[in-house]
Image (tube, rainbow, N blue to C red):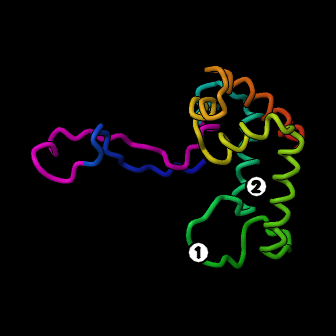
Amino acid sequence: MKRELAERELTVEGPVRSGPARAKRRTVTVNLAESPVAWLHARGHLCDRLFAAGERLRADYERANLAPRVTMLWEPVRVRTTGDTGLTPGERQLAAKQRFDGALAAAGAGLADILWRVVCAGETLPHAERAMEWPARSGKLVLRLALARVADFYRIT
């Protein structure tokens, strides 16, 4: 996974632009490309198979352009991509949407929520647990079950 690092200011009040507080500023380096699934995998909470399933689901989610948008899409048109299958961009988008829907259906109705929140929306496990009113530290187990079903759908060994 390619790292996309950025410096972020670490203050309680928010960013400080000028003045004497500028000298007390603390920063942290953040990897913007890292997902919660990658965070769990890096710390040994997910095996390689479950990590690959999560990344595959997220890739299909992004290829299908399912993320909410506020404005028009201003990305440049890409003519050639690696692994080009001869499909038009619209056909590739529809195929990704079908794979995404199939993976969520394979996970089941009760597990699709945690998959969407953590893998696709990028929410942390504690935040997803609070939003769904689950007991603390139960999300990791449920996420593992959901990712195992997604790995079976994608035939990841």
Label 2 neighbourhood size at 10 Å, few (<14), some (14-19), many (20+)? Answer: many
Quarter assignment of residue 110: top right
Quarter assignment of residue 138: top right
Quarter assignment of residue 139: top right
For the point 73% across and 31% down, the residue is 143
Check the image and name the residue furthest to the front. 133
Report the mark closest to the observer, 1 or 2: 1
The percent coordinates of residue 17 (x first, y second) are: 21, 53
Q: Which amino acid type is marked by label 2?
A: Asp
For the point 63% across and 60% down, the residue is 68
The one of 153 and 1 positioned closer to us in this rendering = 153
Q: Which mark is residue 72?
A: 1
Does residue 125 belong to the magenta stretch? no
Q: Which residue is mark 2?
A: 60
The percent coordinates of residue 95 (x first, y second) are: 85, 63
Taking 119 as reference, is 31 left or right?
left
- SS under mark 2: helix
The one of 112 and 85 positioned closer to us in this rendering = 112
The percent coordinates of residue 106 (x first, y second) are: 89, 41
Label 1 neighbourhood size at 10 Å, few (<14), some (14-19), many (20+)? Answer: few
Q: Which amino acid type is marked by label 1?
A: Met
Q: Is residue 5 above or below residue 83?
A: above
What range of the chain is rendered magenta?
16-38
- SS under mark 1: loop
Taking 23 as reference, is 81 left or right?
right
For the point 69% across and 58% down, the residue is 62
Does residue 37 belong to the magenta stretch? yes
Taking 20 as reference, is 129 left or right?
right
Q: Which mark is residue 83?
A: none
Q: Is residue 150 above or below residue 40?
A: below
For the point 56% across and 51% down, the residue is 2
Sequence-wise, the earlier of marks 1 and 2 is 2
